[in-house]
Image (cartoon, rainbow, N blue to C red):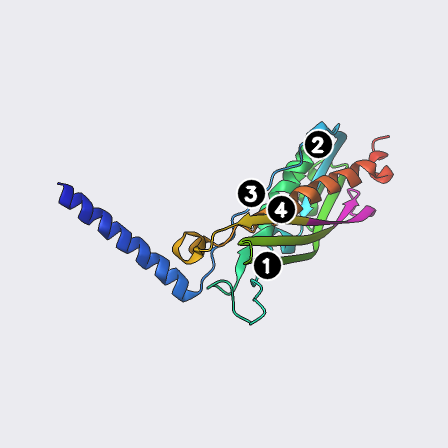
């Protein structure tokens, strides 16, 4: 029985190692895991008494960014894969939606601004439109202390439209996210080699900061706050 167990474990290990090798040889890059949270201060904001449509442009909602890891002075790559893939749109869009549900009395997702029948059906006080302006991720590995350093400059353009799609308010929100990931010098023998360093903290930090800054700008907008007055 002990022999069967050892053979079974051995087979599982060989299979796992084979799958890992295939991934390394193919050069495919799995998505970097992102798990941002909303800034806790958002929950302290008194909701605006507005029913608002939330339209996040497809270019932002579906945005995926590939970023190469920086090389050392000799031009040697620090990592076996050429790129890291960040599903930014898949992460940022739900957080904007979550923030909107907290910020407004009622938030309704809108798939298209061209669907006039849907827009007329809902008694909207306005529509919040979000589009991506810029996203820059800088990745660097500091071998001297074996840590990975991430920086994410993220900016969006936010516009508030009336029910007839006339622009009432517009603003740009830009933030810088930072994050560190401590690793070991034996990276080639660890799971880190297949899943990538956790550069997610820099992107998570940018998403958290951006949603809070967006909420602050909306609250401070006289044009939006005066709609119900």
Asked whether 153 falls inside the magenta stretch, the response is: no
Kindly identify which numbered label has been placed on residue 92: 4
Q: Is residue 136 visible?
A: yes
Instruction: Report the span colored magenta.
Output: 157-176
Question: Mark 3 and 4 residues: CB-CB less than 8 Å, in contact?
Answer: no
Q: Nearer the viewer, mark 1 or mark 3?
A: 1
88 vs 83, nearest the viewer: 83
Residue behind mark 3? 35
Image quarter of the C terminus: top right
Does dot 4 land on a helix, a strand or a loop?
Answer: helix
- Within 10 Å of disc 1 (Cα), the crowding (few <14, some 14-19, many 20+) is some
- SS assignment at label 2: helix
> Is 203 or 59 nearer to us in this picture?
203
Q: Do the residues under discs 1 and 3 have CB atoms within 8 angstroms?
A: no
> Disc 1 marks which residue?
140
The crowding category of the residue bearing disc 4, from other C-alpha atoms within 10 Å (few below 14, some 14 to 19, many at least 20), is: many
First in sequence: mark 3 vs mark 4: 3
- What's the residue at 77%, 42% (across, down)? 163
For the point 74% across and 38% down, the residue is 215
Residue 173 included in the magenta stretch of the image = yes
Q: Quickly name the residue at label 2.
A: 41
Q: Residue at x 73, y 43 (%)?
A: 128
Give the mark nearer the N terminus: 2 vs 1. Answer: 2
Instruction: Name the residue: 53% across, 57% down.
Output: 85
Q: Nearer the viewer, mark 2 or mark 1?
A: 1
Looking at the image, how many numbered discs can be counted on the residues?
A: 4
In the current view of this chain or complex, which residue is farthest to the bottom? 74
């Amino acid at each position: 029985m002990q022999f069967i167990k050892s053979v079974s474990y051995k087979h599982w290990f060989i299979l796992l190692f084979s799958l890992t090798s295939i991934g390394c040889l193919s050069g495919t890059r799995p998505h970097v895991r992102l798990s941002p949270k909303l800034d806790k201060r958002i929950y302290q904001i008194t909701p605006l008494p507005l029913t608002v449509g939330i339209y996040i442009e497809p270019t932002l909602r579906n945005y995926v960014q590939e970023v190469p890891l920086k090389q050392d002075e000799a031009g040697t790559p620090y990592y076996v894969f050429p790129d890291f893939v960040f599903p930014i749109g898949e992460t940022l869009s739900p957080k904007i939606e979550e923030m909107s549900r907290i910020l407004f009395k009622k938030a309704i997702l809108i798939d298209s601004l061209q669907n006039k029948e849907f827009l007329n059906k809902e008694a909207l006080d306005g529509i919040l439109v979000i589009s991506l302006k810029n996203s820059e991720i800088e990745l660097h590995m500091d071998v001297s202390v074996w840590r990975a350093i991430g920086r994410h400059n993220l900016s969006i353009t936010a516009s508030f439209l009336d029910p007839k799609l006339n622009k009432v308010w517009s603003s740009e929100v830009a933030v810088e996210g930072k994050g560190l990931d401590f690793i070991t010098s034996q990276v080639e023998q660890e799971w880190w080699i297949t899943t990538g360093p956790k550069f997610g903290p820099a992107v998570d930090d940018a998403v958290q900061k951006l949603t809070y800054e967006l909420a602050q700008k909306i609250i401070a907008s006289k044009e939006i706050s005066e709609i119900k007055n």
